[in-house]
Amino acid sequence: MKLAFMQPKAMTDPTDDITSEKAAEILRLTLPMMSRNGVPATPHNYATWYAYVAGENAELTAEVDHLIAEGQKFTAAVNARLYRKFLADHDMDRVEDVRTQLSALMNEVGGRLSDAGNDAHAFTGALNTFSDSVSNANDLHKIQNLLGKLLDETHQMRSSNDSMQSHFEEKTREIELLQEQLQAERERAATDPLTGLFNRITLLERIDEAIDATGAGQGCSVIMFDIDHFKAINDTHGHLIGDRVIRFVAKSLQQNIKGQDTAARFGGEEFTVLLPATPSSGAKAVAETIRKAVEAAQLVRADTKKPIGDITISAGIATYRRGEDTMELLNRADQALYRSKNEGRNRCTLAS
């Protein structure tokens, strides 16, 4: 059965001004549309379909519409291709889009507050007019007429306030939703979905920042980790257990860093820890703490309760040298990691 839907006309023109209604509609429609087309709600898939619903990329819209019309399934390979082709390296643009939408909502609410101020000013004027008129009225009939007019003004003001309150309640809900979406987009753009650690892009940005902040002070250090014999773990126990081992190592990194330190999944079974303003001796101490924590753990399969076997990691440590860039620093740590591998694994090696 083909799964298809009509794209809202209001969202097909990316040059339209952003409105709160459009922003809220995009946010409300993205996940249901993904669900109807059998697309898992991963960060990359969400970014792709958010852009599709927003109608901000004509080529993406045309390709997704074609796939839907042909009844093509959105397999993992198809979803990955769409993301790489149309959105790779643009996750932070998505964050800025949501930030812009949030600003548009706040501007609208501010406009309503200004309108409320005008209504209150007009009502104050009506009260002053009534006071002057009552002072000059010389019979009850005229006073009765003036009271009737004042009652009308009062009803109008109350109606305006009730409408404004309802409007604010609605906009408050939309703002809260956008704030949640903004935070979610920031996290999706910065983190690895399997482990919850920062991803490679965020890591590289943070290393750049740490190098820029070095100045005349202590340089930063990086530790590259790799799970020993990981292919054998996958071949013996399967990829689900392999993913569990990756998550376990990621948790071990998180539990043994602090402050401004950054733990990231560099790719596959490789991880990196950034330690700002940390000498090589301090970095090696952190690496050894993490290595020993992994080595001491006894993981068992949830289904059979049998041990998975010894899990160990190797590490390479490099401390920033003045004048080198981020990739040169990482390359030295990577070379030290491979020396650890070649010398027997389950050890930490300082870069020369």
Image: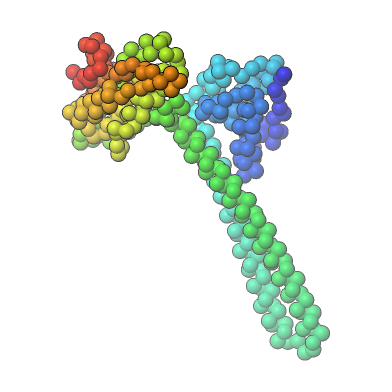
Residue at position x 67%, y 76% from top?
Answer: 127
Residue 305 appears in the rendering: yes
In the picture provided, is 297 more to the left or to the right than 242?
Answer: left
Residue 54 in picture, x, y percent from top left = 62, 32
Which residue is painted at 31% across and 28% down in the image? 273
- Where 307 falls versus 8 (above or below)? above
Residue 288 position by quadrant: top left
Q: Nearer the viewer, residue 241 or 111?
A: 241
Above or below — where is 109 with respect to 135? above
Q: Position of residue 307 (x, y in %)?
A: 36, 18
> Can you tell which quarter of the image residue 17 is in?
top right
Could you say which quadrant of the image residue 132 lies in?
Answer: bottom right
Nearer-the-camera pick, 32 or 62: 32
Residue 257 placement, left or right of 43: left
Quadrant the N terminus occupies: top right
The residue sitting at the bottom extreme is 138
